[in-house]
Amino acid sequence: MITPPPIYTFAEISQIISGLRKNYPELCTLPIDMERFADVRLGLYIDEMPGLAENSVIASAIIDNFTRIVIDSKIFNTDQDASRFFIAHELGHYFLHREHFQKHGAEMSKDEWLEFATSDSSRAAELNANTFARLLLVPANNLLEQAKLIPPPSIPSLTRIFGVKTWVLEHRINDSDVLTGLQ
């Protein structure tokens, strides 16, 4: 049985991202070039994988001992905003869960990985990676600055500014740090 990865609070993920922004100033330029950041700054390979989303329940993964991110070819080649999110999501696993899996998951069998992939621990780790991606791609201070403009920009305009899909922006607007800033 695999030891579950640590689960982080919203505040902990926010703090990790603040540290990343201090160390990597390019994470403050919108929209963030996630592919370049992962490749050039972290030395990760970004590859497309034909049929990944069609043949499984995932559209991206970080594999090969956290050295390579794969994204479904169709998404990678046709949807830059979705690709940006999936790279950010996999970087969430990289920064939040890599040490744990390198220590506890290196010798797991395929059956153990499959058991883990359907567990509550896996779902919690995926939610952490989604939160990481939202917070990284849509910084609260930038979103709040946009919200104060008269008139405020439309949702489609905001998705272009941040380079994200509408659903990413909608979830981000409902995060506690944004809601508090809007009051």
Image (cartoon, rainbow, N blue to C red):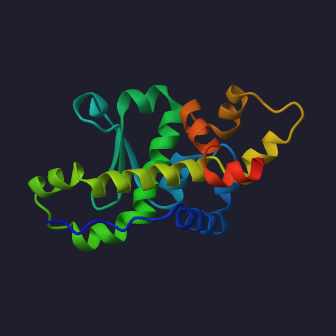
Q: How many marks?
A: 0
Q: Quadrant location of the N terminus?
A: bottom left
The answer to whether residue 178 is above or below residue 42 is above
The furthest residue to the right: 150
33 and 177: which one is in front?
Answer: 177
> Where does residue 35 sit, x and y in percent of width and height?
51, 46
Residue 16 lies in what quarter of the image?
bottom right
Q: Residue furthest bottom?
A: 103
Q: Seen in the image, is 54 located left or right of residue 29?
A: left
Report the front residue among 158 and 179.
179
Vertical relation: 54 (above or below) 169: above
Let me know if residue 63 appears in the view.
no
Residue at the image point whose x is 23% and y is 71% from the top = 104
Q: Is residue 149 left or right of residue 135?
A: right
Image position of 158 (left or right of 127) = right
- How far across and down, in percent of the image, does residue 182 sit? 76, 47
Residue 171 image-quadrant placement: top right
Is residue 157 among what the camera can see?
yes
> In the rendering, at what x and y percent does residue 108 appear?
14, 63
Asked if residue 21 lies left or right of residue 79, the reply is: right
Q: Which residue lies at the image location 34% right of the left edge and 60% below the top edge? A: 66
The image shows residue 56, relative to residue 131, as above or below, that is above
Residue lying farthest to the front in this orientation: 183
The residue that appears at 85% across and 42% down in the rendered structure is: 148
Picture residue at 78% right of the left edge, 49% below the top: 183
